[in-house]
Amino acid sequence: MTVTPPMVEEVATLERYAVANRGAFHNTCGANLFGLCALTLPVALDSSGMPVGLQLIAAGGRDECLLGLALAIESVLGPPRSHLGAPPMCR
């Protein structure tokens, strides 16, 4: 299950941070464990206004192929700022 990143106050204790951290990184663990390469393209905003990503995974050592695929997808979707807007701290 994917999660919206928590507010800093929500992860103030080590126990609460550990729970939130597990929810945030579990989707990336498989690629790391099996030596695959992966990247995430921001494609939308969730109900909290946080970016939602599309994760692409390829065999280890296929970085160039993966980057080419990401560029092709971005050429269809447009650059992230065109459909997500500027990040809040950059406005």
Image (cartoon, grey):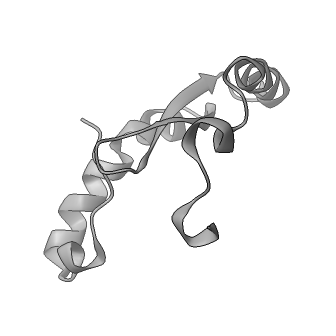
Seen at 72% across and 28% down, the residue is 78
> Between residues 16 and 82, which one lies in front from this camera angle?
82
Picture layout, residue 51 above or below residue 40 = below
Q: Position of residue 33 (x, y in %)?
A: 48, 38
Q: Position of residue 88 (x, y in %)?
A: 52, 65
Seen at 56% across and 42% down, the residue is 84
- The number of numbered badges drawn on the structure is 0
Q: Position of residue 79 (x, y in %)?
A: 72, 36
> Between residues 32 and 20, which one lies in front from this camera angle?
20
> Between residues 63 and 6, which one lies in front from this camera angle?
6
> Between residues 58 and 42, which one lies in front from this camera angle?
42
Picture layout, residue 55 above or below residue 15 = above
* Quarter of the image with the C terminus in it: bottom right
* Quarter of the image with the N terminus in it: top left
Picture layout, residue 7 above or below residue 60 = below
Q: Position of residue 53 (x, y in %)?
A: 49, 36
Seen at 22% across and 80% down, the residue is 9
Seen at 64% across and 68% down, the residue is 90
Q: Is residue 75 left or right of residue 45?
A: right
Q: Is residue 39 left or right of residue 1?
A: right
Dividing the picture into quadrants, the one containing residue 67 is top right
Dividing the picture into quadrants, the one containing residue 61 is top right
